Image (spheres, rainbow, N blue to C red):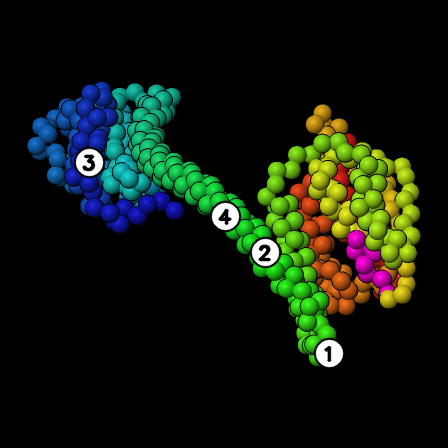
């Protein structure tokens, strides 16, 4: 639909808008405003055609300037109504020689609103259709160029505004990124500081626990010694209940001393520097069995070792402690009167995510310590590396915690497979050297 000519008031610069296009044009042109047909602008060529000065033309209705030109007024109304260019040619037969009047009209737009109509009037004794068409095309092209220029300026203004908004958004993004980077640096520094503080606190606690455990052994040994002396020197004069009390004191002191000894071992594993080197498993196994030889013979135990024994990456003292605790548990956890049977073996398993220093895959060695003891109920296997046996079996219950911590310090894993009433198979894995 064309713009509604009555929907907007004419801008104050309508003559100025037309002046840039028509002031020096050789063809008579005028600008008419609204449906009232009031002439708002004429160029010098139009004044010459009418034979009147500018002051007598501007502000007058068009029909007063062109009397008896009804078709011209009709054409003007159609341009206002439709918003499309129009042209018309008429002849005056009253003169001795035919005179042709040609009218070309096109809308004048400002901000996409129709604010007026430009009229080109030509009087000639010879009418050439081709000339009129070329003239019309030229004038319409000029107007179209003006419209395109205006549209381009509007588009450029919109583009500049969009560019400005984008620059603002980019600046805001850069500021946000800078704040985020700064905050990330602050958090990283805070984490480093807190980690350092936590590490220092843990070391202090471990040192304190080690010191307390070590110092507590002296009074426990005194309790143990005095209870034994009491039984030896005054045992005959004591009642049976008093002798039982003294025996319980002695056993409790022995248990506490063993417990503190295990706590010291656990603390040492946590604190000592663990450097992994190639270790011969066979040598460690022989050393552990030699240390437990008296207990094995006392319990009439049977220990079977199946080679071969690979060389592993380990810390030899820690590895010896781990094997000692596992074999000692296997000797300890048996039904009363049943001699223990233990089987030690090793085999290679899979390739883990880790690798050797030269980038090649590092296979793992799994060491098994299998027994024929009472086994572990399925509901307790997840807790096996904490104290489980209670007072039913001898020991402090820290042995398996030492096993787990020692294997972890050497970069390995530990586990158990057990069937209640059929024995247990403890295992740990270390990298093969």
What is the quadrant of residue 280 in the picture?
top right
Label annotation for residue 204: 4
Residue 166 visible in the shown view: no
The vertical placement of 50 against 406, above or below, is above
Which residue was labeled with disc 1?
Answer: 240
Question: N-terminal of the two: label 1 or label 2?
Answer: 2
402, 378: nearer the viewer = 402
Residue found 30% across the figure and 48% down from its top: 4
Q: Secondary structure at mark 4?
A: helix
Query: How much space separates mark 1 and mark 2, taking CA atoms?
Result: 28 Å
Which of the two marks, 1 or 4, is nearer to us in this view? 1
Q: Which residue is mark 2?
A: 218
Mark 2 vs mark 3, foreground winner is: 2
User: Which percent across, then down, holds residue 51?
Assistant: 12, 26
Q: Secondary structure at mark 3?
A: helix
Residue range (magenta): 328-335
Q: Residue at the location (31% across, 31% down)?
A: 153
Residue 54 visible somewhere in the drawing:
yes
| Structural distance between the alpha carbons of marks 2 and 3 | 112 Å
> Residue 250: which quarter of the image?
bottom right
Asked if the stretch drawn in magenta spans residue 329, the answer is yes
SS assignment at label 1: helix
Q: Main secondary structure of the magenta part?
A: helix
Element at label 2: helix
Q: Earlier in the sequence, mark 3 or mark 1?
A: 3
Q: Which corner quadrant of the image does residue 63 belong to?
A: top left
Compute the Cα span from label 4 to label 3.
90 Å
Compared to residue 110, the image places residue 382 above or below, namely: below
Residue bearing mark 3: 14
Q: Residues within 10 Å of mark 2 (few under 14, many from 20)?
A: few
Q: Earlier in the sequence, mark 4 or mark 3?
A: 3
Q: Are marks 1 and 4 in contact (CB under 8 Å)?
A: no
């Amino acid at each position: 639909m064309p713009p509604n000519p009555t929907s907007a008031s004419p801008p104050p610069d309508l003559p100025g808008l037309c002046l840039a296009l028509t002031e020096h044009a050789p063809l008579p042109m005028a600008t008419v405003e609204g449906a009232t047909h009031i002439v708002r602008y004429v160029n010098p060529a139009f004044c010459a055609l009418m034979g009147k000065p500018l002051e007598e033309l501007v502000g007058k209705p068009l029909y007063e300037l062109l009397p008896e030109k009804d078709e011209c007024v009709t054409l003007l109304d159609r341009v206002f109504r439709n918003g499309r260019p129009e042209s018309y040619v008429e002849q005056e037969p009253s003169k001795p020689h035919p005179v042709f009047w040609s009218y070309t009209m096109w809308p004048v737009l400002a901000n996409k609103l129709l604010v007026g109509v430009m009229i080109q009037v030509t009087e000639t004794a010879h009418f050439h259709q081709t000339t009129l068409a070329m003239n019309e095309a030229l004038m319409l092209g000029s107007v179209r160029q003006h419209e395109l220029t205006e549209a381009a300026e509007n588009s450029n203004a919109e583009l500049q505004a969009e560019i400005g908004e984008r620059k603002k958004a980019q600046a805001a993004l850069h500021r946000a990124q800078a704040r985020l980077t700064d905050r990330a640096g602050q958090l990283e520094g805070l984490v480093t500081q807190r980690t350092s503080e936590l590490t220092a606190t843990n070391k202090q606690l471990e040192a304190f626990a080690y010191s307390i455990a070590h110092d507590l052994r002296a009074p426990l040994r005194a309790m143990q010694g005095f209870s034994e002396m009491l039984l030896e020197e005054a045992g005959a004069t004591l009642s049976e209940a008093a002798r039982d009390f003294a025996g319980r004191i002695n056993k409790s002191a022995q248990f506490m001393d063993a417990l503190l000894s295990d706590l010291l071992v656990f603390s040492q594993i946590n604190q000592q520097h663990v450097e992994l080197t190639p270790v011969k498993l066979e040598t460690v196994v022989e050393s552990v069995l030699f240390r437990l030889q008296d207990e094995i013979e006392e319990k009439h135990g049977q220990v079977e070792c199946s080679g071969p024994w690979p060389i592993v990456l380990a810390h030899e003292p820690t590895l010896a402690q781990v094997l000692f605790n596992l074999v000692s548990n296997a000797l300890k956890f048996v039904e009363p009167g049943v001699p223990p049977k233990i089987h030690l073996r090793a085999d290679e398993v899979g390739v883990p995510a880790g690798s050797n220093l030269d980038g090649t895959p590092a296979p793992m060695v799994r060491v098994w310590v299998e027994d024929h003891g009472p086994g572990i109920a399925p509901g307790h296997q997840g807790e096996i590396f904490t104290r489980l046996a209670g007072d039913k079996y001898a020991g402090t219950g820290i042995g398996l915690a030492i096993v787990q911590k020692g294997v972890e310090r050497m970069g390995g894993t530990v586990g158990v497979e057990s069937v209640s009433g059929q024995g247990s198979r403890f295992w740990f894995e270390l990298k093969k050297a």
